[in-house]
Image: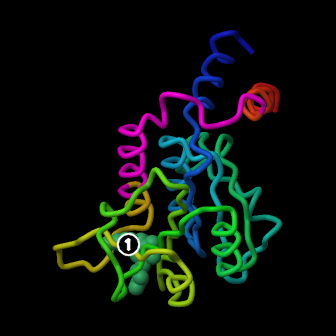
Amino acid sequence: MTPERYAKIRRVLSHRQPTLTVLMDEVNKPHNLSAIVRTCDAVGVLEAHAVPPRGGQMASFEGQTYEATSGSAHKWVPVRAHADTLDAVRGLQAQGFQVLATHLSQRSVDYRELDYTRPTCVLLGAEKWGVSDEAAAAADHNIIIPMFGMVQSLNVSVAAATILFEAQRQRLAAGMYAAPQLSPEALDRLAFEWAYP
Ligand code: SAM
């Protein structure tokens, strides 16, 4: 471990945003999951959440290899697996996160209308069927990226990047990357774990 590498680890951790995350609800294509994790790393998400696709193995999911599209991002953004989407949504809300379901409904708003400086989890749906009506109903808000084309939806990783970079824009403006959001103890612990895995 060179001093430069250790300094880079501390610099990256000083930009991590423990109050920004995603919940991937049965996103089943590994390249989409990998691309989302890579975007999470870029905007400073500390850890991501996922409900494995139906029939998927919980045990193998967390350790799944994302190398194809994530670069090495999977090493720096752990993905916590949950057995059930509604339980995961309620658990994150109990921790103080507003859950924003990417879902077209009567109460959907343009994703840019919301405040991403609040503790926020973006709920992303499966490629085939999207976010379930139950999870969307349990979410604090439903958001959409307005579209004016012939095709009705974006690729899930593109939607994730669009929304997460809006969160980054708002958080930059609010000074949330200027000072560490992690406690000094958590930053020291993670720096040690990243340096000596
Ligand atoms: N047939 C699915 C449906 O009805 O929702 C399409 C799912 S889309 C391919 C996969 C995921 O990408 C969605 O669940 C959502 O998370 C995200 N997504 C795609 N387009 C979006 C948009 N315009 N606004 C917000 N999220 C979008």
Q: As rendered, which of 121 and 40 lies closer to the eye?
A: 121
Residue 145 horizontal side relative to residue 21, left or right? left
Q: How is the image coloured?
A: rainbow
Residue where numbered disc 1 is placed: 143
Residue 127 horizontal/vertical position (percent): 47, 76
Residue 36 horizontal side relative to residue 186, left or right? left
Look at the picture and state if 141 lies above or below 43: below
Q: As rendered, which of 128 and 111 lies closer to the eye?
A: 111
Residue projecting furthest to the top: 3
Quarter containing ligand 1? bottom left
Residue 66 horizontal/vertical position (percent): 63, 52
Mark 1 vs ligand 1: CB under 8 Å? yes
Residue 114 horizontal/vertical position (percent): 37, 62
Q: What residue is rendered at 28% in x and 80% in y?
A: 152
User: Which range is magenta?
Assistant: 162-185
Residue 124 horizontal/vertical position (percent): 50, 70
